[in-house]
Image (tube, rainbow, N blue to C red):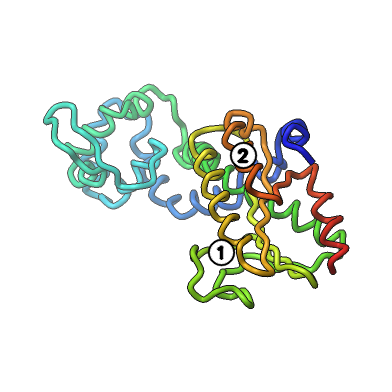
Amino acid sequence: MDFKEFMDSLTITNSTLDSLVDIVKVKNNVTEIEIKLNQLNFLLNKSDLKRAVQDLFKQNKDCFSVLNVLCAVRDNRATIDKESKEIIYLSEYFKTPDSIFHFLTETGLANLFINKNLTNLVDYVFGVEVGLDTNARKNRGGSVMEALISKAFTDNNIPFSTEVRDREIVGFPDNSFDKKKYDFIIKTTKNTYLIETNFYNGGGSKLNEVARSYTDLANNINKLDGFEFVWITDGLGWQDAKNKLQEAFKHIPHIYNLTTLSEFIENITKEL
């Protein structure tokens, strides 16, 4: 296997339909704040929104604590107030009717409330949560990659362990150079293979750092008697970090993608 073959066989995507959005998580997130959202529905279509905020605050001021979610923000992040130029955390805006109305006005939510653009905040937040969940696709992509590799090993009757910390690996030095957890461990009669996996749909500076880091890791592991480092990576993101990956290719004997993984499987099958 040469580098050109590796690059030419990169997979376009490893996304599956069930990895696009975690509907169960979205529903759970909405359910947690559904009562407060229904209370905030009182504000919709009120011509005098400031007065409506005052009335609702008297009845249940706690419901305003979820207003940040309406802006697709879950954390209590700091903002700069345009008028005072002070740094104010979001939760500070939810403590008085005046500051709540200021928040609604400055974020543009007030226009949505007054102009009948919204009919139900529960439905609105469901859509917001779907959007927020797309940020987790990258992590799910990693899980899909691991599932594909796990299936390949299983289908070929290759015994393996997953999520193994280096201190749990028999024969690995106690004073190992890198306290970490490996995605897969395969033990044969000849070697113990420490395997890391990832998939990159997009490029970026992170890929250069990953390639450099794994090159160093491989150099250290491969010095140990009976241990070999294996890197299974894929995705068109590597086209933007081709040079750094090519450099890693020179120093890491075992680099595979989903297409060339069969070569690794064929080799270790002979060692079982």
The residue that mark 1 highlights is 181
The x and y percentages for residue 182 are 60, 62
Q: In this view, does 6 lie to the left or right of 104?
A: right
The one nearer the camera, 138 or 118, is 138
* Sequence-first disc among 1 and 2: 1
Q: Which residue is painted at 84% across and 69% down in the image?
A: 272
Residue 265 or 151: which is nearer the viewer?
A: 265
**Residue 242 picture location, percent across and down:** 61, 31
Q: Which amino acid does label 2 sit on?
A: Tyr
Q: What element carries label 2?
A: loop
User: In the image, is 103 to the left or to the right of 122?
Assistant: left
Location of the N terminus by quadrant is: top right
Report which residue position mark 2 lands on. Answer: 200
Q: Which amino acid does the dot numbered 1 rest on?
A: Lys
Q: How far apart are marks 1 and 2 (CA)?
A: 20 Å
Few, some or many residues within 10 Å of mark 2 (<14, 14–19, 20+)? many
Q: In which image quadrant can residue 77 be found?
A: top left
Q: Is residue 14 left or right of residue 91?
A: right
